[in-house]
Amino acid sequence: MNLRALFRPSAKYSIFALLVVGIVVGVVGYFATQQTLHATSSDEFCMTCHSNHSLKDEVLASAHGGGKSGIVVECQQCHLPQEPFQYLIKKIIVSKDVIGFLTIDGFNTQEWLEANRKEQADHARDFLRSIDSSTCQNCHKRIYEDQPETMKKMAKRMHSNNFKKAEDKRKTCIDCHKGVAHPYPKG
Ligand code: HEC
Ligand code: HEC
Ligand code: HEC
Ligand code: HEC
């Protein structure tokens, strides 16, 4: 198969062909070494497919972009679970985005991102909710137990009230914190 054929519109590909691609990518993902997994988790890797999206600039402009603290948070530090098994699972799920990349019309354009941002944001949020925002908590450790002196009163109150609730009634970080790295779409 020549390269150009790979990027031709998807209608030409049978579901079967796409499935095969998916399975191959999945298997490769599964057997990849930690090293490969790390190489495929850099911001550069994420931005190969999202290269025309403003996502990285948005992070840089946010509180997670290195301002006060000097720490620029990487895409994967928020979006991929750090626990090895969950990480692998998420990677395999993400590898289906290869198909999306080849088949979604105009995917890698800012117009597409803006037109689909709400839906994409909600996918990302659903995932974070499913892991109880554990990626956030990797950095923001023990936000409920020992709150720094410097934390705003309002934040302390919200956090302590949430923590007092039964575990299954508690909100997760992203329920209250929208748009910590990208502007959350209105509406
Ligand atoms: C192979 C191309 C490709 C790569 C590499 C890639 N993405 Fe994506 N990404 C996509 C496509 C395509 C979509 C849209 C998926 C859809 O709607 O079906 C998407 C959607 C997303 C979404 C929103 C939807 C969701 O499922 O949460 C997030 C968040 C995201 N990507 C983050 C990342 C991060 C972080 C990385 C690097 C670890 C990354 N992407 C690397 C192609 C890619
Ligand atoms: C790699 C570490 C890291 C990760 C992961 C991370 N943060 Fe942060 N967060 C920071 C740093 C550093 C700051 C800036 C602190 C400062 O300026 O005092 C910050 C600031 C914040 C702030 C205060 C600024 C604001 O935007 O209001 C909130 C709220 C926040 N993070 C929530 C989150 C949430 C929610 C997640 C998960 C989606 C998350 N963080 C993931 C390190 C991280
Ligand atoms: C019930 C809602 C709620 C939940 C759940 C919640 N927060 Fe907050 N948080 C707030 C409010 C309100 C503020 C104060 C306004 C602001 O700074 O955005 C705040 C402030 C913060 C700040 C800035 C604190 C400072 O120094 O002023 C960080 C960091 C933060 N939250 C992280 C988290 C993390 C991590 C989680 C999950 C473990 C979480 N929050 C869960 C409501 C919540
Ligand atoms: C501090 C945590 C954090 C970092 C760093 C981060 N994201 Fe996100 N991202 C989120 C959260 C949380 C959402 C869910 C929507 C929201 O709340 O804004 C999201 C949403 C998205 C979406 C869906 C569209 C949208 O704008 O909501 C894409 C795509 C995405 N992120 C890609 C990336 C890429 C690529 C990087 C690295 C350049 C990155 N993110 C860095 C936390 C982060």
Image: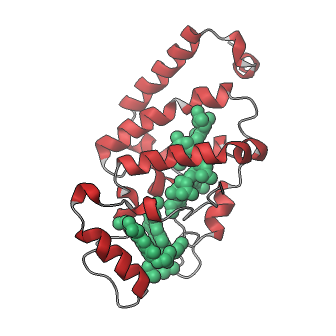
Q: In this view, does 155 lie above or below 120?
A: below
Q: Residue at position x 41%, y 44% from top? A: 35
Q: Could you tell me which quadrant the N terminus lies in?
A: top right
Q: Nearer the viewer, residue 145 or 165?
A: 165
- Quarter of the rendered image showing ligand 4: bottom right
Q: Residue at position x 71%, y 55% from top? A: 54
| Residue furthest to the bottom | 149
Q: Report if residue 43 is visible in the image.
A: no
Q: Residue at position x 57%, y 62% from top? A: 179
Position in image of residue 21 (x %, y %): 54, 18
Position in image of residue 24 (x %, y %): 47, 20
Q: Report if residue 4 is visible in the image.
A: yes
Q: Which of 105 and 123 is in front in this view?
A: 123
Query: Residue 162, located in which quarter of the rendered image?
Result: bottom left
Q: Is residue 58 above or below residue 38?
A: below
| Residue furthest to the left | 166
- Total marks placed: 0
User: Would residue 129 appear left or right of 114 to someone viewing this image?
Assistant: left
